[in-house]
């Protein structure tokens, strides 16, 4: 291990960061591919179907088949589209989705460690700043398509993501107040005694609901709303550009799951003192649990109506999140 | 507004829903992995037709055209011919010189089976008939008639459970109908052509 550490120390920082980024990109994309398969399998089982099972054993090569299919599809641009923005939008979504992984600590960060690329002090703010940019990809993509359903989808996207982000940030500030730091590693360290899901149960509930809405997943998938808007903001997209939006959606789902794990479920902290299992494994298991929860919700709940979605966000989640924030601040202030 | 509250904040209902989907995850799936696993149809399932023979190898069909008359979909074309002492195809006076069923018109009702006085035409449980050309769905005698080496064919009443083992040999025989020419290659096709001409003129 010391030999490895020495090698890592000797490697120039830019090279190390580059290698780590490439590795991370690979890991995240693979995770995306299998998260998709996982979703299709679980959804299938919940709907009394076997799910994809034709490509490879238990359908394990399905993501590869899908990727090949996506690559070979024609890349269409509608004649009414704004070509530059139309082509740029998927990349905005993708970059903002991937960017967050630069600072997510998958395990205890030690100097010159293998896992996280950067340990930013304002970690949680950085992540929110980045993921908030994702709405540009969705709204610009829908706008630039020059077609009515994508436009409706992107209008919904903008409204939904902005109104739910508010409640989401409120719920996260509660955690920041309790932990006394915005560094992700610091927040995990603060949970060593008790995971924040217990003192911040309301905060966690609001975070999870808003996270589902933020990533445009059922039952908050108004942005895509297949039944009413064809495919919402990405109706006109095909081939790899559609694929990029698709990747961005799943990567965002992974991101909010990672944040939920870090903020409320102790990150890489082992539960019940089971420190024998490495922290990374715990982290992955916790994230997987959230992914499952996402899929479970999608297989169960019907889509919100648009006005109810807005009412729920502004009249229920936001007031509760604000009250939770004020109460947390009061308790922390009184205690010390 | 009151109703909205009732629906939206009914957390119990949401949890019950989640419990339902979760329990369904472990239920047995009714899916049949089709190409590798095939459903065992009932012995009297109405599928592809076959023309049976007697044990001595003679064709049961006597070319009476009752099946064609009974057919509600007008899918059957029969043209009979006289048996001669030199060439006895069936025990009766006549035999079917041409026997064609348009399986795309057929509604698989089994009326032909009912009408047949000699139990010559029967429906088998065979259901996989997909093909690339419309013309190849017109099954002529070469694909309908049980080949002599395959035995006599099985009437629905005599069938064991499931798909009989001697089935399928009939339709696997390559058709002598030139499917590339479509309808025109078959007698039925010729009739259709004249019918169309009649309508047009």
Image (cartoon, grey):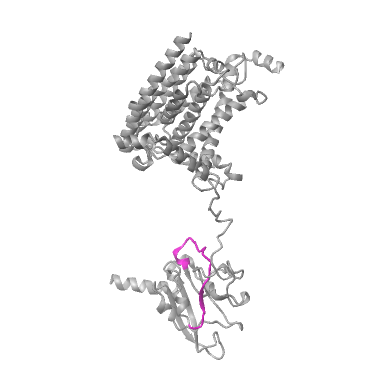
User: Residue B78: x percent and y percent?
Assistant: 45, 79
Residue A288 appearing in the image: yes
Q: Is residue A78 left or right of residue A242?
A: left
Quadrant including the N terminus of chain A = top right
- Residue A137 sits in quarter: top left
Taking the spot 43% from the left edge, 13% from the top edge, the residue there is A329
Q: Nearer the viewer, residue B81 or A294?
A: A294
* In the depicted structure, whether residue A99 falls above or below residue B13: above
- Chief secondary structure of the magenta portion: loop
Q: Nearer the viewer, residue A212 or A273?
A: A273
Q: Is residue A189 magenta?
A: no
Q: In this view, does A292 lie to the left or right of B165?
A: left
Taking the spot 47% from the left edge, 65% from the top edge, the residue there is B180
* In the depicted structure, whether residue B39 falls above or below residue B198: above
Q: Nearer the viewer, residue A258 or B140?
A: A258
Residue A143 appearing in the image: no
- Residue A220 sits in quarter: top left
Taking the spot 59% from the left edge, 17% from the top edge, the residue there is A109
User: Residue B21: x percent and y percent?
Assistant: 49, 42
User: Residue A175: x percent and y percent?
Assistant: 47, 18
Taking the spot 62% from the left edge, 27% from the top edge, the residue there is A281
Q: In this view, does B165 lie to the left or right of A183?
A: right
Q: Does the magenta stretch include residue B121?
A: yes
* In the depicted structure, whether residue A59 falls above or below residue A21: below
User: Residue A193: x percent and y percent?
Assistant: 57, 18
Q: Which residues are drawn in magenta? A: B117-137
Give the residue furthest to the top: A336
């Amino acid at each position: 291990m010391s030999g490895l550490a020495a090698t890592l120390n000797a490697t120039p920082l830019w090279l190390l960061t580059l290698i780590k980024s490439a590795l991370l990109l690979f890991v995240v994309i693979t995770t995306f591919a299998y998260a998709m398969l996982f979703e299709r399998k679980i959804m299938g089982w919940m709907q009394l179907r076997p799910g994809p099972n034709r490509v490879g054993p238990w359908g394990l090569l399905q993501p590869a088949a899908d990727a090949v299919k996506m690559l070979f599809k024609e890349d269409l641009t509608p004649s009414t589209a704004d070509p530059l923005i139309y082509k740029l939008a998927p990349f905005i979504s993708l970059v903002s989705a991937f960017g967050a992984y630069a600072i997510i600590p998958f395990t205890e960060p030690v100097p010159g460690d293998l896992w996280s690329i950067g340990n930013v002090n304002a970690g949680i703010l950085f992540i929110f700043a980045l993921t908030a940019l994702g709405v540009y990809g969705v709204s610009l993509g829908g706008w630039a398509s020059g077609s009515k359903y994508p436009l409706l989808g992107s209008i919904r996207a903008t409204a939904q993501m902005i109104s739910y982000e508010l409640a989401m940030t409120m719920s996260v500030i509660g955690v920041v107040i309790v932990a006394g730091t915005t560094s992700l590693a610091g927040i995990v360290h603060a949970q060593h005694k008790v995971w924040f899901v217990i003192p911040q149960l309301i905060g966690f509930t609001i975070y999870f609901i808003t996270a589902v809405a933020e990533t445009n997943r059922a039952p908050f998938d108004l942005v895509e709303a297949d039944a009413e808007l064809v495919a919402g903001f990405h109706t006109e997209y095909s081939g790899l550009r559609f694929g990029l939006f698709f990747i961005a959606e799943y990567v965002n789902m992974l991101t909010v799951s990672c944040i939920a794990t870090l903020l409320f479920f102790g990150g890489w902290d082992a539960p019940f003192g089971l420190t024998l299992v490495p922290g990374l494994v715990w982290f992955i298991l916790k994230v997987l649990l959230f992914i499952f929860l996402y899929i479970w919700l999608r297989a169960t709940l019907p889509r919100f109506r648009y006005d109810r979605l807005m009412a729920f966000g502004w009249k229920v989640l936001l007031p509760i999140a604000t009250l939770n924030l004020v109460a947390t601040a009061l308790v922390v202030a009184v205690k010390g | 507004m009151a109703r909205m509250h009732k629906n939206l904040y009914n957390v119990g209902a949401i949890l019950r829903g989640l419990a339902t989907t979760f329990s369904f995850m472990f239920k047995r799936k009714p899916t049949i992995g089709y190409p590798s696993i095939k459903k065992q149809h009932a012995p009297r399932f109405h599928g592809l037709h076959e023309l049976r023979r007697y044990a001595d190898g003679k064709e049961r069909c006597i070319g009476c055209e009752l099946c064609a008359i009974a057919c509600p979909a007008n899918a059957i074309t029969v043209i009979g011919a006289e048996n001669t002492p030199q060439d006895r195809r069936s025990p009766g006076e006549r035999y079917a010189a041409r026997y064609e069923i348009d399986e795309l018109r057929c509604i698989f009702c089994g009326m032909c089976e009912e009408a047949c006085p000699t139990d010559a035409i029967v429906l088998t449980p065979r259901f996989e008939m997909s093909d690339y050309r419309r013309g190849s769905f017109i099954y002529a005698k070469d694909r309908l008639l049980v080949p002599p080496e395959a035995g006599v064919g099985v009437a629905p009443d005599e069938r064991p459970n499931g798909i009989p083992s001697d089935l399928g040999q009939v339709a696997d025989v390559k058709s002598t109908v030139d499917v590339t020419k479509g309808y025109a290659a078959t007698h039925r096709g010729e009739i259709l052509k004249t019918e169309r001409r009649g309508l047009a003129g």
